[in-house]
Image: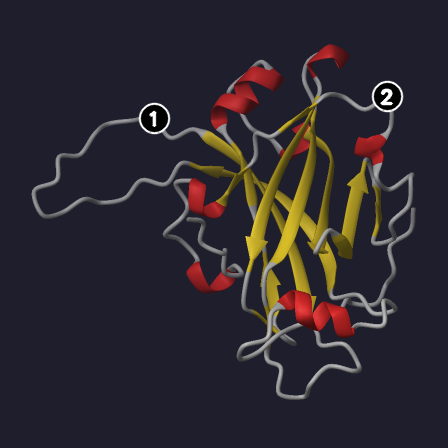
Amino acid sequence: MKLSSRFPVAAVVLAGCFTASSVFGQNTGKDRMIEFKDIKIAVQKTPDFTLKGGTTDKRFRAKDWIEIEPEFRAIAPKNADKNLKVISDVVFKYYVFLSGPGSADRKILTGEVTHTNISFGEVSHSVVYVTPSTILRVAGKPEGSPQLVTGCAVEATVNGEIVGFYSKLGGAATDKVSPESKWWEKGTAPKQEADLLNKAQSPFAPLWADYYADIKATK
């Protein structure tokens, strides 16, 4: 699988009273709505905040969280209204291949994040996390490491249609959708578990606000 060398730029967007689905309906189907540059994998320690105002602090040992962070950019399709500034309600579907000590311990972790009001022409980021307890359960040890993630992928969808894609497995990466690049759908793939957390669900929620794309609030 070979990743195109050009920086990805493509997306369908909305402004005012328009929704992502209405703009998507105008698209010819030839343009991508979201294109990804890369997916970075890192380990973050549980953040420790200083408490004031009489709040009692609690001692804890900071644990490892594995951070899965795609970088992406969105642009309007050729036939979109020139006044459109942002794209709304794009679902990012994540697949993370987490390795364990044996083949039976491997898992594919899944999660979804709905991003809203993504600005055209701006480099932005999404993120999901593997929790410390999931790392311990799958890897058999509490220490997190990027090397535990042997594959990761993200699909950007609108109304169930893929409008952006990026997949890594081993040392290969691609932004092309194919049976090979969708490795989590193969019959030999490990079991899928919906264990990934989005930023709002994690202890990192108050951090780096303008670095990440907005997450649509749930009722």
The alpha-carbon separation of the residues under discs 2 and 1 comes to 38 Å
Q: Residue at x 44, y 54 (%)?
A: 217
Label 2: state its secondary structure.
loop
Q: Residue at x 61, y 18 (%)?
A: 138
Looking at the picture, does residue 124 appear above or below residue 40?
Answer: below
Q: Position of residue 81 (x, y in %)?
A: 69, 85
Looking at the picture, does residue 174 appear above or below residue 124?
Answer: above
- In the displayed orientation, state which residue is furthest to the left: 54
- Graded by Cα atoms within 10 Å as few (under 14), some (14 to 19) or many (20 or more), the crowding at tag 2 reads few
Q: Position of residue 126 (x, y in %)?
A: 58, 54
- In the displayed orientation, state which residue is furthest to the bottom: 82
Q: Which mark is residue 61?
A: 1
Residue 111 falls in image quadrant? top right
Q: Residue at x 77, y 50 (%)?
A: 166
Q: If you read the primary sequence from the N terminus, does the residue marked by circle 2 or circle 1 appear first? A: 1
Q: Amino acid at mark 1?
A: Arg
Residue sitting nearer the eye, 219 or 188: 219
Looking at the picture, does residue 106 appear above or below residue 168?
Answer: above
- Graded by Cα atoms within 10 Å as few (under 14), some (14 to 19) or many (20 or more), the crowding at tag 1 reads few
Q: Amino acid at mark 2?
A: Thr
| Residue ID for mark 2 | 188
Does any portion of residue 23 appear in the rendered image? yes
Residue sitting nearer the eye, 69 or 18: 18
Q: Residue at x 73, y 68 (%)?
A: 24
Residue 140 falls in image quadrant? top right
- Callout in the foreground (2, 1): 2
Q: Is residue 150 left or right of residue 182?
A: left
Residue sitting nearer the eye, 77 or 101: 77
Q: Is residue 45 left or right of residue 8?
A: left
